[in-house]
Amino acid sequence: METMPITKNGYENLKKELERLINVDRPANVKAIEEARSHGDLWENAEYHAAKERQSFIEGRIQELQVALGECQIIEVAGPYKKAVFGATVTVENSETGEQSTYTLLGPYESAPEKGRISVTSPLGRALIGKEEGDEIQVKTPKGVQHLEVVEVL
């Protein structure tokens, strides 16, 4: 089994989500199924089918989180850093457009590119690991190959 890096905060967030699903969402959904059943004919009962679908989602997410928590290895982050490593915040500049972007390198369970958090296992994350200010990298993206320069590592 391969371990996945995660911050202590990220690990706690996964645990809280699992606890909420088990202790709040699952029981609430069981009640919703019981209530929908009480309305009679299940064949055309949209509430019942929606609750059963939600139950499937909840159970799947519980299993997913249990596996994830078993794979996680908590890594302490304590910047500032001189090189791009797990937990570092890296600013890069697109050599062609001059556009700058800032990313925090985290594990796959904490990745949220829209919030500037990328996984160390993503193509960009892998390309950045070990790089220092002034280093140049090339990353293959859906938009094509991007040429980036590391502007700052914190």
Image (cartoon, rainbow, N blue to C red):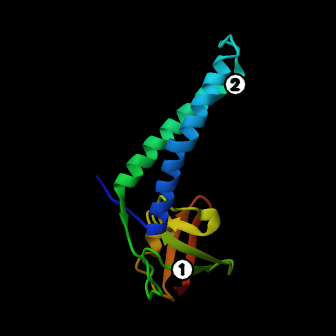
Query: Can the viewer see residue 122?
Result: no
- Give the left or right position of residue 129, taking residue 96 as reference: left
Q: How many marks?
A: 2
**Identity of the residue drawn at 39% across and 54% down:** 69
- Give the left or right position of residue 3, taking residue 136 as reference: left
Name the front one of labels 1 and 2: 2
Residue 81 in the image: state x and y as whole percent.
45, 86
Task: Name the residue furthest left.
Answer: 1
User: Foreground residue, 90 or 34?
Assistant: 34
Tag shown at residue 30:
none
Q: In the rendered image of this protein, does residue 82 appear above or below residue 113?
A: below
Tag shown at residue 90:
1
Query: Can the viewer see residue 18?
Result: yes
Kind of residue sitting beneath label 1: Val
Q: In the rendered image of this protein, does residue 85 appear above or below residue 69?
A: below
Secondary structure of the residue carrying numbered label 2: helix
User: Foreground residue, 57 or 149?
Assistant: 57
Kind of residue sitting beneath label 2: Glu
Q: Quick one: label 1 or label 2, which is nearer the N terminus?
A: 2
**Identity of the residue drawn at 49% across and 77% down:** 137
Q: Are marks 1 and 2 in contact (CB under 8 Å)?
A: no
Residue 136 in the image: state x and y as whole percent.
50, 82
Q: Residue under label 2, please give it.
A: 47
C-alpha gap between disc 1 and disc 2: 47 Å
Residue 76 in the image: state x and y as whole percent.
40, 75
Image quarter of residue 121: bottom left
Image quarter of residue 6: bottom left
**Identity of the residue drawn at 71% across and 22% down:** 46
Label 2 crowd bin: few (<14), some (14–19), many (20+), radius 10 Å: some
Residue 17 in the image: state x and y as whole percent.
52, 52
Label 1 crowd bin: few (<14), some (14–19), many (20+), radius 10 Å: many
Secondary structure of the residue carrying numbered label 1: strand
